[in-house]
Amino acid sequence: MRLRSRLLPLLAVAGLAALAATAAAQDVTRDRVLMAIEATERRIEQAGMLVSGSDNVQARTELDFAIDIQGRAKGAFVAAQLAVAARLTFEARNHADRAISIVRGLDPDNALAQLERTREILERARDRIEECADDRARAMLRVAFEMQDRAENAGRSGRYLAALQLTMSARERGLKALRLCRLQEDLQDGAERALHRTDEIILRARDAVAAQGSDFARQVLARASALQDDAYREFRAERFEASLRLTTSSRAFAYRAIRISGRGL
């Protein structure tokens, strides 16, 4: 039952695009649009309660988008632009659902960014543990790679919660293998590598957005760039863990900008 309740927001997101696309074609009545706006209000309130207890930057941004677009939907409703109001409130609900999904660990872009981060850690760990004489560390690293393969397969099949759970477990095993060999991941080196990788993804996102991006894709890309600037600022201040968290969030936004541009939204 708990897993089913976690999956409901994703199922709702999948259906919202179709609903929004057909709204204008239907005989949109004032009562129907008002009901949709009220339903979105409830969803935004739910998202707000969840996001308030989380420090997830992506979720906060999605909630801000939802609130802004919902305000525009209300304005269109007051102006008797019912089809516009319907389209906007469905779009706002989509962002609120996405904020909920992010907090609950179901966001595909965040999952992809975390999968990449774990792969980077494991690849570096393998190079260092090859010279380690501790068989336990080598065995643990093999298990970590097996779990990471399963995590990536889960991500490709759209099972983002499973992907996140598996990749974080794989990452912990990789780091534990390093500790068994009396090695530690160099946070400064890890942050620097992660920053450079995110720079590459942002460049790809800029190309995608320039080619066929929407205004929303440009907003998402701007958020990615701002977070990356913050990540570099933390890196220069030698706050490497904070830099890693920020650049991982930036990378997730960059991936989303690419995905949005690819759909031509």
Image (tube, rainbow, N blue to C red):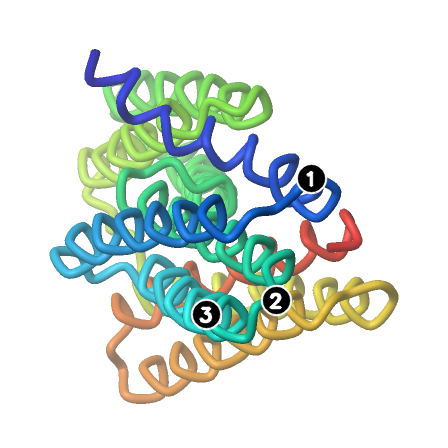
Asked if 55 appears above or below 231 in the picture, the reply is: above
SS assignment at label 1: loop
Q: 46 or 171, which lies in front?
A: 46
Comparing 133 with 172, the one in front is 172
* Helix, strand or loop status at disc 2: loop
According to the image, label 2 marks what residue? Answer: 81
- The alpha-carbon separation of the residues under discs 3 and 2 comes to 50 Å
Disc 2/disc 1 C-alpha distance (Å): 14 Å
Mark 2 touches mark 1? (CB < 8 Å): no
Residue at point 41%, 62% (across, down): 66
Q: Nearer the viewer, residue 103 or 125?
A: 103
Residue visible at 27% across and 39% down in the picture: 104
Label 3: which residue?
Answer: 192
Which quadrant: the N terminus? Answer: top left
Q: Nearer the viewer, mark 1 or mark 3?
A: 1
Amino acid type, residue under disc 2 in the picture: Gln
Residue that numbered label 1 is attached to = 26
Instruction: Categorize mark 2 by other alpha carbons within 10 Å: few (<14), some (14-19), many (20+).
Output: some
Q: Nearer the viewer, residue 193 or 181?
A: 193
User: Relative to 215, does residue 104 appear above or below in the rendering?
Assistant: above
In the image, is residue 119 above or below residue 209?
above
Instruction: Identify the disc placed on residue 165.
Output: none
Name the N-terminal-most of marks 1 and 3.
1
Q: What amino acid does circle 1 point to?
A: Gln
Q: Residues within 10 Å of mark 3 (few under 14, many from 20)?
A: some
Relative horizontal placement of residue 75, taking residue 9 as reference (left or right): right
Question: Residue at position x 52%, y 27% from top?
Answer: 155
Residue under the point 43% across and 29% down: 160
| Quadrant of the drawing holding the C terminus | bottom right
Amino acid type for the residue under numbered disc 3? Glu
Q: Nearer the viewer, mark 3 or mark 2?
A: 2
